[in-house]
């Protein structure tokens, strides 16, 4: 006897939708058409599936090699139910209807191959911190992103600023630049006294997580 068998919280969600949240940290995808997913994000599947490394083309490969923007993908094809997760981070599904979304590469979990994607320098970022490069997705289809904690979605109807590592994603139509804080003796943001933030102008949204993300361990 266990509440794992009786509590609806742990019951698999229905398969009537192509993509759905099993819970806040687990994504369920019903496969028919292939999808692209972060390598290593599969935690379970039922049915018959194939997993193949997804080459990104020479131009994207060179960009990733030069920028360190991490978006290593696998193409998943077959039939059945696929479950994806990444370090128990929260997962959010966004449906694009012809628009564009700029996402920190480490926050991309999965998306439909119908969306086009590329690694781009963040407009106005120059070479601060070695340059800022994110992943731009656009077209028609869904994308699942992750956040480290409960995010806030800011409507950009006035100048908006965010820590570069806490800004998970934003509308690609927004204009970005760098806002510099000159009072260096003050601790700005969640980092150790960073003096520059991403500035956003225009009409759109910015998704901000309450964290600068997971610390990468030295090899």
Image (spheres, helix red, strand yellow):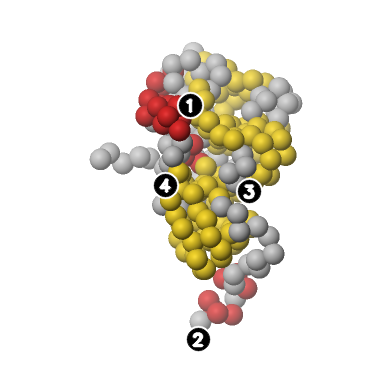
Q: Position of residue 9 (x, y in %)?
A: 60, 69
Q: Are marks 3 and 1 in contact (CB under 8 Å)?
A: no
Label 3 vs label 2: CA separation? Answer: 34 Å
Q: Quadrant of residue 158?
A: top right
Task: Name the outermost residue toward the bottom.
Answer: 1
Which callout, 2 or 4, points at the residue further toward the start of the chain?
2
Q: Residues within 10 Å of mark 3 (few under 14, many from 20)?
A: some
Judge left or right: residue 75 versus residue 218.
right
Residue wearing tag 2 = 1
Give me the residue at 61% from left, 39% from top: 115
The number of numbered discs placed on residues in the rendered structure image is 4
Label 4 vs label 1: CA separation? Answer: 22 Å
Give me the residue at 46% from left, 36% from top: 56
Q: Are marks 4 and 1 in contact (CB under 8 Å)?
A: no
In this rendering, the label closer to the viewer, 2 or 1: 1
Residue wearing tag 1 = 133
In this rendering, the label closer to the viewer, 2 or 4: 4
Q: Are marks 2 and 1 in contact (CB under 8 Å)?
A: no
Q: Secondary structure at mark 1?
A: strand
Residue 106 in view (yes/no): yes
Which callout, 3 or 2, points at the residue further toward the start of the chain?
2
Q: Position of residue 27 (x, y in %)?
A: 56, 57
Q: Quadrant of residue 31?
A: bottom right
Residue wearing tag 4 = 53
């Amino acid at each position: 006897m266990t509440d794992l068998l009786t509590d609806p919280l742990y019951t698999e969600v229905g398969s009537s939708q192509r993509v759905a949240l099993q819970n806040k940290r687990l994504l369920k995808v019903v496969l028919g058409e292939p999808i692209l997913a972060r390598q290593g994000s599969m935690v379970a599947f039922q049915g018959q599936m194939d997993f193949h490394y997804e080459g990104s083309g020479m131009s994207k490969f060179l960009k990733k090699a030069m920028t360190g923007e991490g978006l290593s993908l696998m193409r998943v094809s077959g039939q059945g139910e696929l479950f994806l997760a990444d370090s128990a981070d929260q997962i959010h599904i966004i449906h694009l209807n012809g628009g564009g979304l700029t996402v920190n590469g480490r926050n991309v979990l999965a998306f439909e191959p119908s969306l086009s994607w590329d690694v781009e320098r963040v407009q106005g970022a120059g070479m601060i911190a070695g340059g800022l490069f994110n992943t731009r997705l656009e077209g028609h289809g869904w994308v699942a992103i992750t956040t480290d904690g409960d995010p806030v979605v800011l409507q950009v109807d006035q100048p908006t600023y965010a820590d570069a590592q806490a800004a998970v994603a934003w509308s690609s139509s927004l204009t970005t630049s760098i806002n510099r804080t000159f009072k260096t003796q003050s601790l700005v943001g969640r980092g150790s006294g960073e003096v520059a933030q991403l500035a956003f102008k225009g009409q759109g949204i910015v998704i901000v997580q309450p964290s600068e993300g997971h610390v990468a361990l030295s090899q």
